Amino acid sequence: MDIKTLCLGLLCAGDASGYDLKKQFESTFKHFYPAGYGSIYPSLADLANRGLVTCREMPQDKKPDRKVYSITPSGREAFTAALQDVDPEHKVRSEYLVAMYFADFLEPQRLEQMLAVWRESLGDGVTRLKSLERDVGADAPAGTRFVLGFGKAIARAMAQYIEENGDMLTGPEREHESAGLAKTNNIETRL
């Protein structure tokens, strides 16, 4: 699924500006599908050119006009068709996991700092998702509640794994391993 399809889905719930959609991506979707202005605004422009959304400008005091997008009937049909045709795939992209894969190249203090910041950010994520759950309330659609709960469960499980296994990277056996890695650390030994 692409950003355009997600924008159509969000607009099915009501009219929104690009800024409103960005806030939605930063809150509800942040833990599984981030998007920035650089992808949202071009997507909205393309959707408008294809007649899947309309755009109206709303004047604001001492600010540029606000562009508010509305889904059209053909946009709603396109979203429904795309949702029916999707073959979902769960993907994970984590700079933390890349860094941990190469942990033997990190200074121990830096590694411990990275793990601590990661645990803290996971805790902040759970707090943010709990707040979103309160904001949307018990009457929110089941899909919204499911996704927020899933995000909390994943963040908690990740934090627990780091807590229980972080010493694998920072413990005394790491120093012993690191001594030999300079000679043997190549792609063939990692695979």
Image: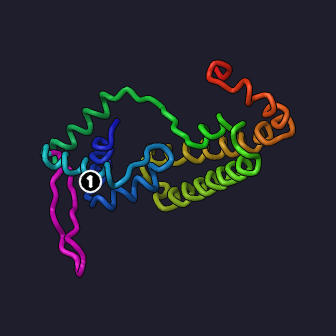
User: Looking at the rendering, in which quadrant would you find the C terminus?
Assistant: top right
Q: Quadrant of residue 106?
A: top right
Question: Does residue 179 show up magenta in the picture?
Answer: no
**Which of 2/9 is in front?**
2
Helix, strand or loop for disc 1: helix
Magenta stretch: helix, strand or loop mostly: strand
* Residue furthest to the front: 183
Q: Quadrant of residue 170?
A: top right
Disc 1 target residue: 41
User: Looking at the rendering, in which quadrant would you find the N terminus?
Assistant: top left
Question: Does residue 69 show up magenta in the picture?
Answer: yes
Q: Is residue 6 left or right of residue 28?
A: left
Q: Residue 46: image x %, image y %? A: 19, 46
Compared to 129, does 50 lie above or below? Answer: above
Count of residue discs? 1
Q: Residue 56: image x %, image y %? A: 15, 62
**Which of 27/40 is in front?**
40
Compared to 88, does 113 lie above or below? Answer: below
Compared to 50, does 54 lie above or below? Answer: below
Q: Is residue 129 left or right of residue 19?
A: right
Q: Residue at x 59, y 37 (%)?
A: 98
Q: Residue 116: image x %, image y %? A: 71, 53
Q: Residue at x 23, y 50 (%)?
A: 44
Q: Residue at x 22, y 76 (%)?
A: 60
Q: Residue at x 60, y 53 (%)?
A: 126
Q: Amino acid at mark 1?
A: Tyr
Q: Residue 41: image x %, image y %? A: 26, 53
Local packing at callout 1 (Cα closer than 10 Å; few below 14, some 14-19, many 20+) is some
- Which segment is the magenta one? 52-71
